[in-house]
Amino acid sequence: MKAPAWFNRSSILFGILTLVLVYALKFHYSHASASRLGWILWPTSRVVQIITGISFESGPNGFVSWEHGATIAKSCAGVNFLIIALCMSIFIKIQDRHALLKQAAVLLQSLAAAYGLTILVNSTRIILGMTLLNADIYSGFITRTRVHRWEGIFVYFTGLWIFYLLLKRKRVKKTDEHSRSWTPLFWYFSITLLVPLLNRSLLFRSAETQEHVLYVLAIPFIIFIGSLIIRTIFRITVASCQLMLKNPVLRMNKNMSNFAGNKI
């Protein structure tokens, strides 16, 4: 079986370098306190402050708004999302055949893009979460914990899906479009579920964990299917309009139908 054209020595080294970077990020996040995560918590708090006008200041557990009782803590850093976006970006770009030096530049570009995306998406998630916190929607099954979880999964995967569409516009051929549409799902599930399962940090012993896994699986899949349906309807509509513009007979029949309808 012939290996893909992009599978060469420089790509292998590029992949190894990426794995080392991802492991370093994951290790740093796992062992760092909130004060050592200022490189991602501080810009996130600034974006939230600029958009909402709510002031945050550095505290022992992160960045705190004493007036509103809100804290952007370590768990709000979005490092896992950063890793997912970075891996997906590199997976897409590594398929372009580049020299090792060029691939190193691609790695830095992907890291910068993933970092900026994480700040933007995470700030959106925090702002929406603060808005929903005081919303009058909670009763019975609809609890603050569940809504917070649903909102986080929705915002993170939607941001990842939009990032994928932007990356794909630059390089993916239309013939490969259907098969590669699963790329965001693959990387989201791999980092949020597969990796925790392998290192045994995710166990199914509690009902809460089982519920969390169900939402992590269901919400991104619903977004994925919904997006494909909307895109399919849009393309059919555009193709029909283009065909009508190119075919004068169809255009004339439509005008006659409109005329008959107005006459009636």
Image (cartoon, grey):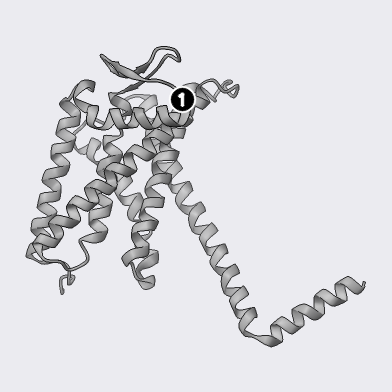
Identify the residue under disc 1: 53
Q: In this view, does 196 lie above or below 10?
A: above
Reply above or below: 49 against 13: above
| Residue 193 visible here | no
* The quarter of the displayed image where residue 196 is located: top left
At x 53%, y 58%, the residue is 229
Q: In this view, does 127 lie to the left or right of 13?
A: right
Point 45% across, 51% down: residue:
224
Return the x and y of residue 14 as percentages of the image width and height: 12, 56
**Quick check: 15 above or below 198?**
below
Disc 1 residue type (three-letter): Gly
Label 1 SS? loop
Between residue 3 and residue 233, name the one nearer to us: 233
For residue 112, side relative to residue 70 (left or right):
left
Q: Residue at x 14, y 62 (%)?
A: 102
Q: Position of residue 12 (x, y in %)?
A: 10, 59
The residue lying toward the viewer, choosing from 115 and 129, is 115
When asked about the image quadrant of residue 208, the answer is top left
